[in-house]
Amino acid sequence: MCRNIRPLNNFEPPATSDEVHAAALQFVRKVAGTTKPSAANQEVFDRAVAEIAHVTAHLLDDLVTTAPPKNREEEAAKARARAAVRYVGPA
């Protein structure tokens, strides 16, 4: 799994189109095995990103949950704490 792809569901406010596009871009980069496609593959690369972003936006719109919406700042703080343990070690 790509570490740069973050969960986008059930946040308040909802995920932006920029966040959805960034996740789609990371996914396509991972699958394609490259961060920058050749000129010959640029069009198909961009089309894949657009299509995946489109489908992802529909997925996020259609998902249903009874859980309360997550707070972005709280989730970011949790991620920073996990990273601190992972890269620095326990306190």
Image: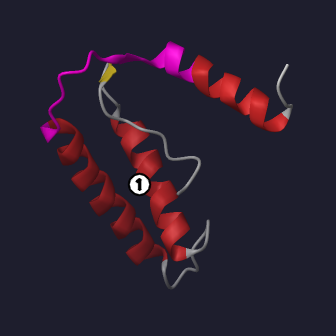
Residue nearest the observer in this picture, 47 or 73: 73
| Residue 16 image position (x, y, % from top left) | 35, 32
| Residue 12 image position (x, y, % from top left) | 32, 17
Element under label 1? helix
Q: Which residue is mark 1?
A: 24
Please report the bounds of the magenta region as a residue range. 62-76
Q: What residue lies at 69% left-to-right and 22% top-to-bottom? A: 81
In the image: residue 44, left or right of residue 6: left
Residue lying furthest bottom: 40
Q: Amino acid at mark 1?
A: Ala
Q: Is residue 79 magenta?
A: no
Residue nearest the observer in this picture, 82 or 90: 90
How dense is the environment of label 1, judged by Cα within 10 Å: few (below 14), some, or many (20 and up)? many
- Residue 70, image quadrant: top left
Q: What residue lies at 51% left-to-right and 56% top-to-bottom? A: 26
**For residue 77, above or below residue 21:** above
Count of marks overlaid on the render = 1
